[in-house]
Amino acid sequence: MIKLLKIDYKKLKGYRTFWVLIILYFATMGLVTSSGMEFLKWLVSKGADFDQVDILRIPLYHFPDIWQNLTYVSLYFQLVLAIVVIVSVTNEFSYKTIRQNIIDGMDRKDFLISKIMMVFMLSLASTVFVFLIGLITGLIYTPESEMRFIFNNIEFIPAYFLATFSYLIMVLLFAIWIKRAGLAIGIILIYPALEYAFGASLPDSWDPILPYLPQHAINALIKVPFQRYAFMEIQDYVDPLSVIVVFAYIVLFVYLGYRNLVKRDFN
Amino acid sequence: METILVTKGLTKHYGRIKAVDGLDLEIKKGSVFGILGPNGSGKTTTLGMVLDVINKTSGEYTWFGEKPNKEHRKNIGAILETPIFYPYLPGDKNLELVCDIKGVDYSRIPEVIEQVGLKGREGDKFRTYSLGMKQRLSIASALLCNPEVMILDEPTNGLDPQGIAAIRELILEIAGTGKTIVLASHLLDEVQKVCTDFAVLKQGKLIHTGKVADVTKGEIAVEVMAKEPIEEILNNADFILTVKEERGKYILTLKEGTNASMVNKLLIDQGIIASHLFTVHQTLEKQFLAILDESA
């Protein structure tokens, strides 16, 4: 497994687009997620009025709120990682290197495992990064009296990992199915909208199946946290049902990707 | 003799098209096996199936007498059609990847680079290579694992005459080390020059298989030319069966057991010195065309 990961890393290491995307990803995500308070200050300095509410008192970066807030926002940057995954897979088809890899002695399963390992490492790196940002900004902004909540709600960190990993596995499947980078990127861009439109078009009596749709399930791992600052009820925990559904989807996606690769002829 | 590759009834259908149709082949250890056939006769599809990049429709094949698996492919150096590498990686990094897949030590890389004559260019990106260099790199990559078997599909495709000669030389050199080589080609001259055995495919079917030496050993004619008129002398000689003139050359067919030296002697006895005397051997090309015609 480690050998397969090393092989895939070697393929990416010399590829400039990979580094551009990775740097872009971490830089923008790091900058945006850590500057929330600065953004609020800027709003206030520009004279934004929030009905007498002092928005600078919103505990965005206070433990334990920070874990859900931060992971929720960070998920929006996944798209950049999705492009990395798509390019890494579709290149193998357009250069035909997957064919030569097989001829040289990889089998289709090894190839898939090497890509899954790559997805795993990307998800892990992203999770570690988000955790560090949370830790650092939390330590900066949290008042002394709330420091004891530092690891409350830390379950959002593994949930973030799961959400990223499962999403990228779905992207991997799309890349294997579609084979072309441009088309695959287009489809993963519109797919969530399609799934939500589909969900909305179903009669209300079908609503109970919604959490079982893939994008719904992945998104349900970390729910929008911000309404709590307008005194609304939110789901401030990770629902075990979503975890189970997402795991089931990971297995399904991997199986579908495997089946597609095994049945394909590489002419 | 040990067999390297055996196929039994190997078949590939693409919809209604039978790209390979019930192919039975046997390739022995140490042979240089040429697979011949017109374009689209199923050569590459056959090699694709035994290398597991194309799923067979039916039939079987074995490598080294065993059920095929990826470990076999790690001991096979193969290139199918065009050289395939990561264009953004330098030549040597591409070879490192092949080493990683095959489980070969990187120390082999400088050796094979040297062997194919790419020294000095291994650090350049693959996409900057000329076609000849790309072919050389793919042969280098096929040599990496010091393979028992090499599979080369049209290895001289698109090369200039110098490149063709260099690759041919390389194949002969490799064959000289006792490796088994499978060479798919539509260049008959190439197969005749390097192969020991050959098979002819047509529309996915095997229509002939045999030894190259058996096909090309026959001497079929002698060409002779002289300043003096010699047609009558030739016509009167009893060991010469037919005489045909072609652009000043006389093309003779001789009785069995006789050869060009007798023609030479005949002329010298008459005080004539031939300016051109040449024995025409049977060529694979003629045989190949005859085989294709027969099967039509």
Image (spheres, coloured by chain):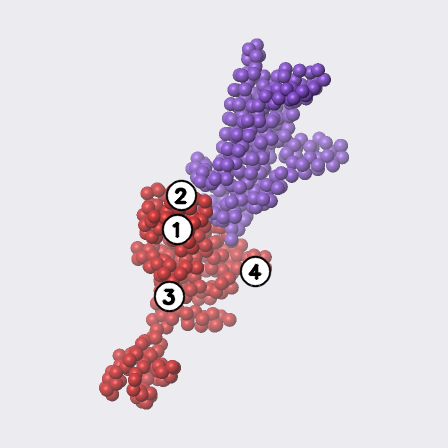
Q: Residue at x 58, y 38 (%)?
A: A171
Q: Are marks 2 and 3 on the same chain?
A: yes
Q: Quadrant of residue A175?
A: top right
Q: Could you tell which of marks 4 and 3 lies nearer the N-terminus?
A: 4
Which chain has been coloured purple in this picture? A
Q: Position of residue B158 (x, y in %)?
A: 44, 59
Counting residues from the N terminus, which is met first, the one under dot 1 or under dot 3?
Answer: 1
Rounded to the nearest angstrom, the CA distance separating label 1 from label 4 is 34 Å
**Residue for point 57% across, 40% down:** A173
First of labels 1, 4 by sequence position: 4
Residue A142 appears in the rendering: yes
Disc 1 and disc 3 on one polypeptide chain: yes
Upstream in the sequence, badge 4 or badge 2?
4
Q: Contact, CB < 8 Å: mark 1 with mark 2?
A: no
Q: Position of residue A115 (x, y in %)?
A: 50, 39
Q: In the image shown, does B167 or A242 lie closer to the viewer? A: B167
> How far apart are labels 2 and 3 at the CA level?
36 Å
In this view, the residue farthest toward the top is A145
Residue occupied by mark 4: B17
Q: In the image, which disc is placed on residue B137?
A: 1
Q: Are marks 1 and 4 on the same chain?
A: yes
Palette colour of chain B: red
User: Which residue shows up at 47% across the image and 57% down it?
Assistant: B44
Neighbor class of circle 2 (other Cα within 10 Å; few <14, some 14-19, many 20+) is: many
| Amino acid at pointer 3 | Gln
Residue identifier under label 2 = B93
Marks 4 and 3, how far apart at CA: 30 Å
Secondary structure under tag 4 reads strand
* Callout 2: SS: helix
**What residue would you read off at disc 3?**
B192
